[in-house]
Image: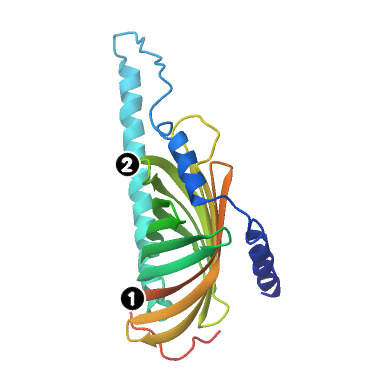
Amino acid sequence: MKRTFLFFPILLIYLAQPIFSQSVKGLDQAAKGNSGRSTGNSGSSSGYSGSGGGDVGSSLNGVLFFFQTFVYMAQGFALLGKEEIRLAKRNRTENNLFSAEANIQGGYGFTDFTKLQAQGRLHLGWLSLDLRQTILNDRTTEFKTLDFMAWFNLANHRNFKLRAGMGNMSLQNTGDSYFLYGAGVEVLPTDKIRIELFGTLTQRFTSSEMRPRQDINLRVHYDFWKKGYAKASFFGGVSSQKYFQDHTLTTVDAGVNFMLSFHRFNTTPVQE
């Protein structure tokens, strides 16, 4: 645990380094310059040169493959169902395994720009759905992104959570969309403190090597109110977004989190 607490200050210092980052106006121009290259295919087609006949053995193999796939999928869904039941029982005391969250936050960048962000999350055991709207502003330009992410909660310990996910990131200034994927961890050192660290990468749907955005976020939550099925927390942190390998925008963030659990919160701390 001591090593964990040392890790987060080091990360905070790293994220705060690129203070003299580019402007939102420069980012908007870069996005428009790269617009239209995120969709489509390579333009080549391999065509089809089949034998034209149909093969009985191949047909039987196809039927067998379909049947095996169906069986494996059914087994997988059965295991996920058992995991959901197990996590639902744990949620009676942990509360964050099945819940809905809303984050409202603002950020300040040291090159005279601001960030506003609204985020909604729905936690359903092993699956979490995340919708995040980000607006970057300077004196002349507004830049908007919309992220949708499906997180797969791979580890669900009481004091530590690990997740990986995939989704879609949209640059609303240009209308371009990109494949989004990432990973995150959550550490709960006490009953009232929650530390989040998550990062995402984007990838074009073509073979281009340029990443439209790299994103990393650190948040520290402190619960200040809890009653019935709801609780609220203040959080602060730092985040850094790098667009088109050239435009880094780093902010110091603060916000409020509201959580509504599927089960009533305990009024006494959970014992180790």
Quadrant position of residue 58? top left
Q: Amino acid at mark 2?
A: Phe
Residue 213, placed above or below residue 52: below
For the point 51% across and 45% down, which residue is it? 26
Q: Characterize the local packing of mark 1: few (<14), some (14-19) or many (20 or more) Cα atoms within 10 angstroms.
A: many
69 with respect to 160 (left or right): left
Decide which of 106, 199 is in the foreground and name it.
Answer: 106
Residue 242 picture location, percent across and down: 55, 49
Mark drawn on residue 177: none
Quadrant position of residue 48? top left
Q: Amino acid at mark 1?
A: Leu
> How far separated are the C-alphas under marks 1 and 2?
36 Å
Q: Mark 1 or mark 2: which is in front?
A: 1
Mark drawn on residue 70: 2
Residue corresponding to mark 1:
260
Residue 257 picture location, percent across and down: 41, 74
Q: Residue furthest bottom?
A: 268
Decide which of 52, 197 is in the foreground and name it.
Answer: 197
Decide which of 65, 165 is in the foreground and name it.
Answer: 165
Quadrant location of the C terminus? bottom right
Observer able to see residue 34: no
Quadrant position of residue 84? bottom left
